Image: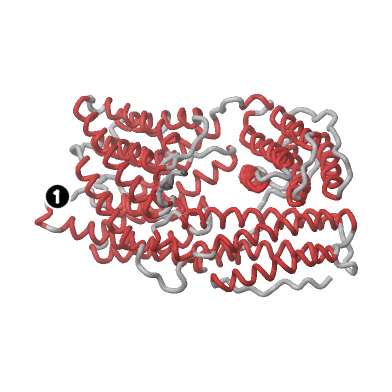
Amino acid sequence: MSRHVPTLPPWLAHTLRAQRGPVPWSAVLRGALAAGPLLLVAVLVGRTSLGVVSAIAAMLAGINDRPGSRRVSVQRLGVPALAGAGGLLLGTYAGQHADAVMLTVLFTLVGLVAGSLSAVGTVASGAGTQLLVASAIGAGMPLPEPGWQRALAFLAGAGWLLALRLLLPTPGAMAGGDYRFDGERDAVAAVYDAVAELLDAAGSQAATARRAGLTAALDHAQDALAGPRLRRYASSAAERRLHAQYAAALPLAEAATALAWAGEAVTGRASEGPRRLAAAVRGSTHTGPLPAPHRSAPALRALDDALLHAAEAFDHAKGSDLHTRRRTAGALLRTVFGAGGREYGLRVALCFGASAAVAQALHHARWYGQHEHWYWLPATAVFLVKPDLGPLASRVLCRAAGTVLGALVFAGFAVVLPRPEGLIALVAVSGALIPVATRHFAAQTAVVTVLVLALVMVGGEPQASAGRIGETLLACAIVLIVGHLPMPGQRGGGVRARLAAAGDAAQAYLEHVLRESDARVVRRPEDRAVRWTLRREAYRTLAEARTAISLNAAELPALARQAEGADEVAAVLERLVDTTTACAVHLDDTGRLTPEDAGRLAALLAELAGHRERVGLRRPEIPLAG
């Protein structure tokens, strides 16, 4: 007799889930050298208040200091820091010249803009977060310095952490001979490893997960090569080599995807070549002889040709510039002003404005007593309302639990630590723990709570653990209420916007392959590069849609139901893009699409049209003529 094993509801299971992986020791070192030392220097020179601002900026930059290349860290840390400095300047002058009503209106408008822009991507979301948090701090934190000095101190704090990221070597950085490109090398090498793993899984049930892993590796490498100074005309041999190695991986990925789509196992000899290429990337060495797979099928012949092309590219460092995402200004505007951006912006605006109004009311209420840290309430609401940080219920539970734990831990330290040297040491330790704590929102909240409360005491204010807990619980209530309010238009706009973008990218990719199959069209060598770029965008937008769907599924049932049917649409889109890839490989081999290929595509398009209509995503069908 089988026993029924109870399962946790998705929203609770997500709350208990944490990311895994090795400890990022280099990020831990940067965290220890950031906020604490900045604060110490400020105290020694008698500018403690500016040191507090710099330490806050370093803390926020530390939250964004994720694994990746040095080049991408310039954008990931620098753009949010600039937004935060602007927000601090805006909040300072608004707090000095606006009354409570005008301040609430201003915060609501800023929240609308920042929330809508956050829908663009990770960097934009980080910039929106820092803009809002710094606006609240500037308006409410009692500092003697004018706004421009606060903004410069904020930039100095974030800039210090960015300088540490660019200058300090990471473990194993010298293996390839140039420590500047360690993150880029690892990212490109991981693509070749993912190709090998997909070839090993061809014909098995693990193929789908391995194909998703290849997409993630390509996304990561694309981001790593997209930072400053890695442009079309690279300035050094090392940069040109990285470009060539990434470009050479794209036809390999295409052939491996086609083999996995066919559902037939391949010999281990096929995956040995990509693994040798991965080792050559990591060690910055020559590839040596590569084992050739059997050329018994179109996809295997494509794999063999791709290996030969890769060997030549590795030796001569010649390759196309294919690392940049082809996103037009019109596409970005559609994201900001589309359904996803509007819903995101409205919820952020309502939460930020409502929390500011409640905080101002409590601040001026005689019966409530002193409420000096009223800016904590809107600043806390910002982190809670951001949907890219996780499902709503998970965010609220983790924030509440983390704040209580952090406040209690700090209350114990505050009794025994000497001031200010002990508190400064606590800030340094908390900064070092942030890169590890970011694996779980509750742990991150606990560490940040300790750091913030220590900064408050170093600034000369009394111990405020109880106030911090109260502000957080009030912010949780506001965000829960706003999060369940009906919004204008169709619900689940964020998920539908991601699905629509994935559908558009799949359509562009398929249309290009169909044009290549037209006998009346002259095929040019550069057409394949365009196809690989379109294929990358199709798989990348699909991965983004899958992430949004997964987060929505972990919401409370009332919110999870808003995007019912989205998972089926994503599944059909994935099969359509996989089939298009297999057709493209077959087209390169034979010069035409077979009736079977056209039939498969037509069936998938018909199935996709039915699913789209049920979830309200209507799009014109793609003609299969030619």
Query: In front: 514, or 350?
Result: 514
Q: Is residue 615 left or right of residue 301?
A: left
Residue 122 image position (x, y, % from top left): 51, 51
Q: Quadrant of residue 516?
A: bottom right
Q: Who's the residue at 43% across and 63% down the image?
A: 345
Query: Regarding mark 1 in the picture, which secondary structure is present there?
Result: loop
Residue 428, can we see it? yes
Q: In which quarter of the image is residue 275?
A: top right
Query: Can you identify the residue that label 1 sits on?
Result: 370
Q: Who's the residue at 27% across and 59% down the image?
A: 356
Task: Tell me how many marks there are.
Answer: 1
Query: In front: 294, or 307?
Result: 294
Q: Who's the residue at 76% across and 31% down the image?
A: 276
Q: Which colour scheme is used?
A: secondary structure
Query: In front: 350, or 397?
Result: 397
Residue 228, can we see it? no
Give the position of the C terminus as an image quadrant.
bottom right
Q: In which quarter of the image is residue 109?
A: bottom left
Q: Is residue 160 left or right of residue 456?
A: right
Q: Which amino acid does label 1 sit on?
A: Gln
Residue 23 image position (x, y, % from top left): 49, 30
Residue 457 image position (x, y, % from top left): 23, 36
